Each structure stands twice: as structure tokens, then as C-alpha cells.
């Protein structure tokens, strides 16, 4: 009989094994897709190499003698080798491995199948080494994608594993489409045309959350920022006409279709209705209304002096003013005191100058 511990451990081990198996299956599916991608690169590079070597020859030029005695370069083994050498980046393990493993297939195709099967990708990747499927099909048996191999996903999406031996054939729909078959429209889109195999989804008018047609009158429901008007159309909400304004005190409101924005007032304003110094509701401190525009107050030219301390003078600034000490005075503990007498400075300079060798001459 199993002990309690073993009984608990067994299911856990089993579920672990299932997980590992799942990962392996997922990995294997990814491998099948990437094997086809590698094969595609190989055959693409083969075709490029074929073009690159189209104008080459044995090196010295195809002389009449060479054409007679040797097989033509065009169909030669040397040309094949030159093409095969350029099939993979040296760093791509998967590519080099595939080419090494199937080198003889390239020879078979080159010498025996090329004329009858000119499409190397189809012959090599799909039919011979079987890592790819024809377009519109997927999986180990190359089954048709959802919606059929002619127009996978009804032309509105990508079929998982399309053209590879991997994937599950399910659709990932293009933007605007949804559903297993990519025939349905996502919210904000409507079916302009629709039948069992064809669907065209078009974006609704910007004012609609959902709709049945292209105009603002075809909305089922208005989007946020829009509202029903008398004619049953969705029109813009003018958020800026609301009271109180949705913006801060030092901002003005700018209405836009479906929304609004708040922008900073000019710095000369205290509240405003728009941009610039002429849209102020009131002037900011230090500014006054002059012909409908807020302009700087020149405090220094007012009849009552604003700088009251002795030896002070007034300097006007934008939106304010400053009191500074007059020439010959400097600030000390909030008072303007006389600077060291200029004569002393000059004297020192003079004595230095006198001491200079030029004066002595
Ligand atoms: Ca608006």
C-alpha cells in the first residue's frame, strides 16, 4: 500500500511530466516553423546565387574550345558549388546543418529536376525535405488554413503556421477585425460589406463609440467628449463653456473636437480667456491695463517714490522694480553706506604707477 506522502507525490510528478511534455510539444511546433524559415532563406539565397553567377564563366571566359570540351559553366558542378557556398551565414548553425544534411538534394535538383521543377522552394522545402507547406496551408499534413488556402482568414488576418509544417492554422486578425474567421468588426468599426466569405470593416466616425455607418449620424453610441444633438448625430461637447471651467485659474480652456485642453495664461495675466497679454481677465501684480493689454507698471516714475531709503535709486523691471544704492554707495546691513573714497583707490593706483620703472625714466 502507498504511504500518504507517496500518494500526494505521484499526481504532482505526473503533472510535472505533463508540463514537460507540453513544453516539448510547443518547442517542436516552433522548431517546425523555424525549419521552414531556414529552408526559405536557403532557397532564397540559392536563387540570389543563381542570379549572381548568371554572368560568370569558368574564370577565363567561355572560349569556343571550353564550350566544346567542358560542360558549359551555366549548368556545371562548379557553378552549383559556388552557389551552395553562399547559402548560409557562417554563424547560422541551423542553416549550415540543413545544407550539409541535404547537399545531395541540391545536386539532384541541379542536374536532374531543375527543368521539370523550376521552383526550388517548392521542390526542396515543401516536397522533398518536407519542412514547409504550400501557401495557405499549415501543420504536419499541410491542412488548409481557417478560411481556406486561397484566402486564409478571409484575407483579413494571418494564419498561424501558414506555409510551414508547424502552427495550428488559427487566425490572428488584422486591425479592425476579430472572431475565429476574421469576418467580424471590432468596436469602433462597422461592416461596410459582409457575406460568408468576405468582410470589409471600416472605422466609425471619430464621434462614435459604435456605429452602423461612416458618418456622425450613424453612431449607435457617442464616444466620450461627444453628445447627441437634436438631429440624432454626435456633436462635440464644448467643455470650455462649462461653469466652473475645467481648467485651473492661471489657465485658459481650448475646446477641440471630442476633447479640450488647458493652456497656461500669459504671465502678465491674472486669469485669462485666451493666449497673449490682451486676453487677460485681470492684470497680474506689477502690470496694468493699457488699451486692453496688460503692460508693465513703471514704479520708478510714479510721483510717490518707492525707494525711500537714503542714497537709494529705483530700477524698473518687468512686473516689478528694485531699489539699489546710488553710485558711490554700497549696501551694508540694509542701508546704503558710502563706498571707500575714490581718491584712496586712485592714490594707491598712483603710488603704484609712480613706482613703476617707466615713470622713473
Ligand atoms: Ca470638446
Image (tube, rainbow, N blue to C red):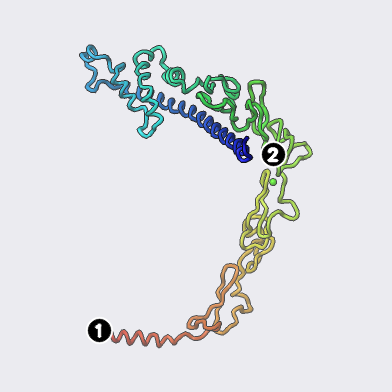
| 180 and 344: which is toward the camera | 180
Depicted 228 relative to depicted 48: above or below: below
* First of labels 1, 2 by sequence position: 2
Most extreme residue toward the left is: 65
- 15 displayed left or right of 187: left
Label 2 belongs to which residue? Answer: 207
Q: CA distance from mark 1 to mark 2?
A: 90 Å
Depicted 173 relative to depicted 124: above or below: below
| 282 and 130: which is toward the camera | 130
Picture coordinates of residue 227, whole percent (x, y): 74, 42
Picture coordinates of residue 124, whole percent (x, y): 42, 19
Picture coordinates of residue 332, whole percent (x, y): 52, 83
Picture coordinates of residue 216, whole percent (x, y): 71, 36
On the question of residue 216 being in view, the answer is yes
Label 1 belongs to which residue? Answer: 357
The N terminus: image quadrant: top right
Q: Are marks 1 and 2 in contact (CB under 8 Å)?
A: no
Q: Residue at x 61, y 41 (%)?
A: 5
- 164 displayed left or right of 361: right
Q: Residue at x 71, y 43 (%)?
A: 224
Amino acid at each position: 500500500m502507498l504511504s500518504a506522502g507517496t500518494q500526494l507525490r505521484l499526481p504532482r510528478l505526473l503533472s510535472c511530466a505533463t508540463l514537460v511534455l507540453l513544453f516539448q510539444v510547443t518547442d517542436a511546433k516552433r522548431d517546425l516553423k523555424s525549419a521552414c524559415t531556414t529552408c526559405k532563406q536557403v532557397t532564397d539565397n540559392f536563387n540570389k546565387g543563381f542570379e549572381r553567377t548568371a554572368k560568370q564563366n569558368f574564370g577565363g571566359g567561355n572560349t569556343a574550345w571550353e564550350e566544346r570540351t567542358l560542360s558549359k559553366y551555366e549548368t556545371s558542378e562548379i557553378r552549383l558549388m559556388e552557389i551552395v557556398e553562399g547559402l548560409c551565414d557562417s554563424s547560422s548553425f541551423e542553416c549550415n546543418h540543413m545544407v550539409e544534411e541535404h547537399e545531395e538534394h541540391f545536386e539532384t535538383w541541379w542536374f536532374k529536376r531543375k527543368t521539370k521543377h523550376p521552383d526550388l522552394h517548392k521542390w526542396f522545402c515543401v516536397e522533398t525535405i518536407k519542412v514547409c507547406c504550400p501557401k495557405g496551408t499549415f501543420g504536419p499534413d499541410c491542412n488548409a488554413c481557417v478560411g481556406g488556402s486561397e484566402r486564409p482568414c478571409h484575407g483579413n488576418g494571418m494564419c498561424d503556421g501558414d506555409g510551414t509544417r508547424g502552427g495550428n492554422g488559427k487566425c490572428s486578425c488584422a486591425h479592425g477585425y476579430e472572431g475565429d474567421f476574421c469576418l467580424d468588426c471590432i468596436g469602433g468599426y462597422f461592416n461596410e460589406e459582409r457575406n460568408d466569405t468576405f468582410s470589409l470593416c471600416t472605422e466609425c466616425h471619430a464621434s462614435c463609440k459604435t456605429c452602423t455607418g461612416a458618418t456622425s449620424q450613424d453612431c449607435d453610441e457617442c464616444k466620450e467628449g461627444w453628445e447627441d444633438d437634436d438631429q440624432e448625430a454626435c456633436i462635440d461637447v464644448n467643455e470650455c463653456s462649462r461653469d466652473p471651467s475645467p481648467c485651473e485659474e492661471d489657465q485658459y480652456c481650448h475646446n477641440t473636437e471630442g476633447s479640450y485642453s488647458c493652456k497656461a495664461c500669459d504671465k502678465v495675466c491674472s486669469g485669462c480667456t485666451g493666449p497673449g497679454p490682451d486676453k487677460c481677465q485681470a492684470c497680474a501684480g506689477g502690470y496694468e491695463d493699457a488699451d486692453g493689454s496688460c503692460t508693465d507698471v513703471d514704479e520708478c516714475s510714479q510721483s510717490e517714490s518707492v525707494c525711500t531709503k537714503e542714497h537709494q535709486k529705483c530700477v524698473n523691471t518687468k512686473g516689478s522694480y528694485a531699489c539699489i544704492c546710488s553710485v558711490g554707495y554700497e549696501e551694508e546691513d540694509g542701508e546704503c553706506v558710502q563706498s571707500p573714497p575714490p581718491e584712496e583707490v586712485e592714490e594707491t593706483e598712483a603710488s603704484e604707477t609712480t613706482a613703476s620703472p617707466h615713470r622713473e625714466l
